[in-house]
Image: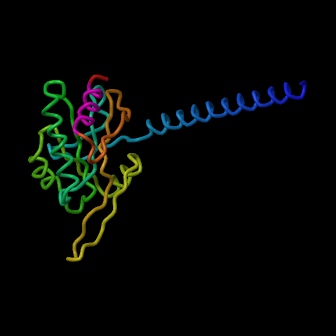
């Protein structure tokens, strides 16, 4: 009887210990996720298709989005910018001051003039930014994005790149992402939530 009680107590203690360890693991993981979440992005001053430069320090107080791509992109970039244009139109007055920055990963071909012509096909709140090679390397590190030049059979090249829209809140902090191919309703809900925040 005494042995049974001891065994029951030992099992209960083990269950409690495992439960506590599991809870602690979840809390630590949650803390890591929150910590990592706020490490996306960084300061930048980049040449703009609208003329002059865009300094990220001047963006405080209004939410905005950042997307990396290039003008020779066959599908992902035009699709993403078209979908964002549709979302912005649907949001109406609530998104009148919202800005979307399209940063090229191909500055060798994407001059400011070329980028200006390209974004003219989309919502005017989409502004193209052109980094130097060194600035692009820093941005890739700050935003945790991937890009690489890929040779094509005709002797030219294309670019592989991260196909994610990065969302930033009024406080300038990373607030989430919109993935390529994400449902229109989900994109809309994320943007609406960002604008309210």
**Residue reaching furthest to the top:** 196
- The region drawn magenta spans 184-195
Q: Position of residue 88 (x, y in %)?
A: 16, 34
| Residue occupying image coordinates x 53% and y 37% | 32
| Residue occupying image coordinates x 61% and y 35% | 25
Which quadrant of the structure image shows residue 191? top left
| Residue occupying image coordinates x 36% and y 33% | 175
Q: Nearer the viewer, residue 136 or 29?
A: 29
Q: Is residue 66 above or below residue 107?
A: above
184 horizontally vs 36: left or right: left
Q: Position of residue 85 (x, y in %)?
A: 15, 40
Taking the magenta stretch, the answer to whether it contains residue 191 is yes
| Residue occupying image coordinates x 9% and y 47% | 120
Quarter containing the C terminus: top left
Q: Is residue 147 above or below residue 157?
A: above
**Residue reaching furthest to the right:** 2
């Amino acid at each position: 009887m005494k042995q049974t009680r001891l065994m029951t107590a030992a099992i209960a203690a083990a269950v409690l210990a495992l439960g506590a360890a599991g809870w602690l693991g979840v809390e630590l993981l949650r803390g890591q996720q929150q910590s990592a979440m706020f490490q996306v992005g960084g300061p930048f001053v980049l040449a703009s298709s609208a003329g002059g430069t865009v300094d990220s320090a001047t963006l405080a107080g209004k939410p905005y989005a950042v997307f990396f791509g290039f003008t020779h992109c066959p599908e992902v970039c035009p699709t993403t910018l078209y979908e964002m244009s549709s979302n912005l139109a649907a949001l109406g007055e609530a998104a009148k001051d919202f800005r979307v920055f399209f940063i090229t990963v191909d500055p060798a071909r994407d001059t400011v003039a070329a980028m200006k012509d390209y974004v003219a096909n989309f919502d005017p709140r989409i502004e193209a930014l052109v980094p130097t090679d060194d600035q692009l390397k820093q941005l890739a590190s700050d935003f945790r994005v991937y890009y690489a030049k890929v040779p094509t059979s005709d002797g030219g090249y294309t670019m592989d790149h991260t196909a994610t829209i990065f969302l930033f809140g009024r406080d300038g902090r990373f607030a989430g992402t919109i993935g390529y191919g994400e449902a229109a309703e989900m994109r809309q809900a994320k943007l609406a939530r960002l604008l309210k925040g």
